[in-house]
Each structure stands twice: as structure tokens, then as C-alpha cells.
Image (cartoon, rainbow, N blue to C red):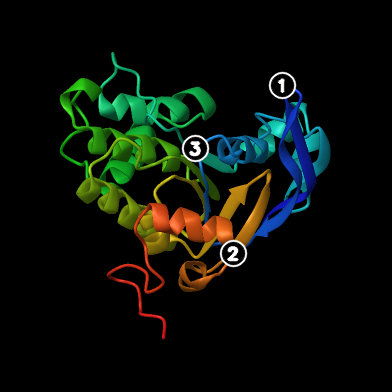
């Protein structure tokens, strides 16, 4: 569904992405992990053409988004929802109005239709009783859930997550991971997650890709990921105290 073909991105005289090629299948949760500064968010931004490759191409099914502009680019972007790292809620609007914002700006739905869509999105993320609160009146985890409700309220085909558990305590982080998995299944969407949180990736992803040096050094299912001998992956796993047996909740690998 999303395809990178030999993508190189040069920023500040340095190749942040280097001849990167991969494909994300429709309906999967594809999680990109790696140390800071390795190009994870840069990769994500190419998918909606917030950045354009220096060389190579990015495809959303049969459309080359890296070459699209005008109405064609708008049509492709309509297929995406985006959860920003900090939630990006507007502090002077209550939660419901934050979620309604893309519907009011980008659609011709009536206020009653918008209200129904917002109520549905709030219910999906467990905030049905919190729509009238300001962002400052809810916790960080609830703000992330509100941001996620806004990302799905237009019923996108693809949702991009930029560090969805950043700044959250471990219990809340696992709640967000479970929510990403449930929404992916319930809505039939494709999810692309950029994260430092390898524990969350192992519990929620269908495939995990380790990015370092501008390229993927490992792309595999979680159980295979924790048993690989690839040295960069092993170092990343060891730094988060994850053994070859994985995490509680994963099936043990013989």
C-alpha cells in the first residue's frame, strides 16, 4: 500500500535516508524503531509529502505521492490521519471541538453529522464523557487519545503515529499500544508507527523495521526481531533489557 523505491533524503549535506526501499502492506501495523536522529520521522513525513526525496520515489498504491501536487496531492493526503507527537490539541478549544476541527475545515458535513462523528470517535478512544473538557483539564494519556480521535474522525485509510507513547508512564503507554491495535482491527486501517518504545512495538506491531544509517537493517515480525543476530538490533534490544525470549505477553521462542 505504501512503497519506497530507492529513497535518499539529504539534509544539511548528510544523507538522512540512503537508498531506502520497502513496502507496507494494507491493513498491517508497521513500526519503525531506532535511535534518535536516524531518520524515523523523516521517513514518516515522506509518506504525506511533508518532505520530498532528494532521489527516489514514494508511492501510495498506484499514485506517486513524491511527484504529486495540487488537487492530486490533496486527494492522496485525504487518505491519511496523523497523530502528532504531542497530540497538538488547541488549548482554547474543548476536546470535542478539537476533534471536530478537521471535519469543519475539510468537509461539508452538517453540524449534526459532525456531532455524530465526534461522538463516535470519542467512544472509540474511551473519552465519551470528556468532550467538554479543555486539553489542560485532562491527562497526557487522554490528550494522546483525543489526538488519536481527531486522526480517525475523517475515517482515513492510513494513520501515521509519531512517537504515540512519548512522555507517558508505562501503564498509560501500554494502553495506547492496545488502542492502536484495536483501532487497526476495528476500522480496517493501515498503521505506521514511529517510536523509541521497543516494548510497545513488540506488543502491537505486525512487523518491526530497525532504521540506522539511513537504511533498514532488520524488517521482521516481533518474535523474529527479538531473536535476530543483527548487531544494531541486538544493541538496541539490550539497551532496553529485552531478551531473546521477548516480553510477557509474547509467545516464547524456543
Pick whichever, 135 or 221, lies toward us: 221
Could one spot residue 103 in this view of the protein?
yes
Secondary structure under tag 1 reads loop
Q: Residue at x 56, y 34 (%)?
A: 37
Query: Which label was assigned to residue 226?
Result: none
* Other residues around mark 2 within 10 Å, as few (<14) / some (14–19) / many (≥20): few
Q: Where is residue 192 in the image (x, y as percent from the top left)?
A: 53, 50
Image height of 201 relative to 125, above or below: below
Q: Which dot, 2 or 3, sits closer to the camera?
A: 2
Is 30 left or right of 123, judged from the image as shown? right
Q: Quadrant location of the C terminus?
A: bottom left
Mark closest to the chain's N terminus, 2 or 1: 1
| CA distance separating discs 2 and 1 | 29 Å
Pick whichever, 165 or 244, lies toward us: 244
Image height of 19 relative to 100, above or below: below
| CA distance separating discs 2 and 3 | 31 Å
Give the residue at mark 2: 230
Pick whichever, 20 or 29, lies toward us: 20
Query: Which label was assigned to residue 12?
Result: 1
Q: Which residue is drawn at 68% across and 43% down?
A: 214
- Count of marks placed on residues: 3
Could one spot residue 29 in this view of the protein?
no
Q: Residue at x 49, y 23 (%)?
A: 105
Q: Which dot, 1 or 3, sits closer to the camera?
A: 1
Secondary structure under tag 3 reads strand
Q: Which dot, 2 or 1, sits closer to the camera?
A: 2
Query: Which label was assigned to residue 82?
Result: 3
| CA distance separating discs 1 and 3 | 26 Å
Is 109 left or right of 6, judged from the image as shown? left
Cβ atoms under marks 2 and 1 closer than 8 Å = no
Amino acid at each position: 500500500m505504501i512503497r519506497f523505491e530507492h529513497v535518499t533524503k539529504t539534509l544539511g549535506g548528510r544523507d538522512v535516508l540512503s537508498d531506502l526501499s520497502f513496502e507496507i502492506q494494507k491493513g498491517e501495523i508497521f513500526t519503525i524503531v531506532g535511535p534518535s536522529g536516524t531518520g524515523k520521522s523523516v521517513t514518516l513525513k515522506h509518506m504525506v509529502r511533508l518532505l520530498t526525496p532528494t532521489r527516489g520515489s514514494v508511492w501510495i498504491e498506484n499514485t506517486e505521492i513524491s511527484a504529486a501536487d495540487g488537487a492530486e496531492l490533496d486527494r492522496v493526503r485525504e487518505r491519511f490521519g496523523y497523530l502528532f507527537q504531542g497530540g497538538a490539541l488547541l488549548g482554547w478549544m474543548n476536546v470535542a471541538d478539537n476533534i471536530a476541527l478537521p471535519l469543519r475545515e475539510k468537509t461539508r458535513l452538517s453540524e449534526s453529522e459532525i456531532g455524530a462523528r465526534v461522538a463516535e470517535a470519542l467512544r472509540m478512544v474511551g473519552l465519551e464523557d470528556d468532550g467538554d473538557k479543555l486539553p489542560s483539564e485532562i491527562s497526557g494519556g487522554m490528550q494522546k487519545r483525543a489526538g488519536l480521535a481527531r486522526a480517525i474522525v475523517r475515517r482515513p485509510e492510513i494513520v501515521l503515529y509519531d512517537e504515540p507513547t512519548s512522555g507517558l508512564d508505562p501503564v498509560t503507554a501500554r494502553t495506547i499500544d492496545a488502542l492502536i491495535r484495536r483501532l487497526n482491527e476495528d476500522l480496517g486501517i493501515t498503521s505506521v508507527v514511529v517510536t523509541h518504545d521497543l516494548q510497545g512495538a513488540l506488543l502491537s506491531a505486525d512487523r518491526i523495521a530497525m532504521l540506522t544509517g539511513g537504511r533498514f537493517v532488520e524488517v521482521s515480525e516481533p518474535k523474529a526481531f527479538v531473536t535476530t543476530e543483527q548487531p544494531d538490533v541486538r544493541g538496541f534490544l539490550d539497551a532496553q533489557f529485552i531478551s531473546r525470549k521477548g516480553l510477557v505477553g509474547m509467545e516464547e521462542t524456543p
